Amino acid sequence: MSDSFRQATGRKVVSRTSAQDVGTVSHFLVDVKERRIAAVVVGRGKKARLVDWEHVSGFGLDAVMVSDEGAFRSALDDRERSGVDGSLDLVGKRVLTDRGNEVGTLDDVTFDPETGVVQMLRIGDREIPAGSLLGSGSYAVVLDRREEAAP
Amino acid sequence: MKLLVTASQINGLPVVTVGGGEDVAEVRDVIYDPEAGRLVGLTLNKRGFFSGRRREVLPAEAIHSIGRDAVMIVDESSLTAPEDAPDDIAHPAKERNVIGGDVLTEGGRSLGVVRDLALLVGSAGEVVGYQIEKPAGGHGYIPLPAQLAVSGQALVVPDVTEEFVRDDLVGLGAAVDEFRARLGLR
């Protein structure tokens, strides 16, 4: 099973206890070391809030179910605040290798909706295993130099 | 085949952390030790237009990799306060004294005047050649031996260097290994 950041962005988020729409998915916060989704950002601008992956009870193709509205929280630090406003988004970011060479723009990220584990990174036609992901921030996504196409 | 960049192409490149993906500075200037044929380090500017000099410097040992599009460092702790940095970076008196120097072969032939440095992409600042302005005009590139005699006015290279003058960085990248092999055989 696989879902992607691009496909899931804009999907509605529903509270399992109240069965009410509570917003839509706007961004993903990724734990690069663990290569998994740390939190999902719901809503945009001042209304944006975070749901830690542990509180996502079902990441479905039609809706993202969260346990209840108590699962929502605000950003706790600068990095999370950047995540909430989208500046840490992987999709759309320039991709550098750790050699310092640019290899393109990240088009999409696939993940396992059961576990939140990031599977593949897509750059144009290339699918790159998430194991090559070394870092990501507001400026760039950094991949292992193995992912540099031979000159 | 080696991928190369010139020092002037490095100026202005962002300095990016591998783990954080953040651009923490940009390259202000390249500090070079011509006798050792390697970078000593980089001085830095803050990111963004007109944002001015950053106090910290980046010693060559702390560079993860110099690339075509960015200088990579492990994290921001790689940046060093000038008082903790090697003297050559804090007080770069030797800075660029090779630029403008005449390249003379051991046989006494002038190959041209040094205009820029050619560095190995993916290294922490290994200088493998120079861009020169040829006596007849126009640019060329020459490979460097590991060590050579340098003064403020000139530098002396082996005679064989003359056979390895190339028109561009790609040509130099292809010639470096052969040049070094030839020197090793002598």
Image: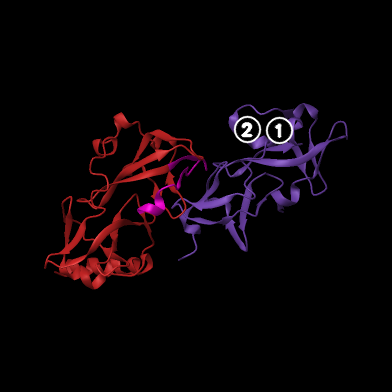
Chain colours: A purple, B red
The stretch drawn in magenta includes residue B44: no
Counting from the top left corner in percent of width and height, residue B124 is at 34, 49
Counting from the top left corner in percent of width and height, residue B69 is at 47, 53
Residue reaching furthest left? B107
Front residue (pair B141, A122): B141
Front residue (pair A86, B74): A86
Q: Secondary structure at mark 2?
A: helix
Q: Which residues are magenta?
A: B7-26
Amino acid on which disc 1 is placed: Leu
Query: In the image, what residue occupies the spot 23% across and 73% down?
Result: B163
Chain at numbered mark 2: A
Which quadrant of the view contains residue B4? bottom left
Q: Residues within 10 Å of mark 1 (few under 14, many from 20)?
A: many
Pointer 2 residue:
A80
Relative vertical location of residue B53 with respect to residue B167 in this rendering, above or below: above
Counting from the top left corner in percent of width and height, residue A89 is at 64, 44
Which quadrant of the view contains residue A77? top right
Q: Are marks 1 and 2 in contact (CB under 8 Å)?
A: yes
Residues beneath discs 1 and 2 located on the same chain: yes
Disc on the earlier residue, 1 or 2: 1
Quarter of the picture holding the N terminus of chain A: bottom right
Front residue (pair A135, B100): B100
Give the distance between the C-alpha atoms of the residues marked 1 and 2, in whole angstroms: 9 Å
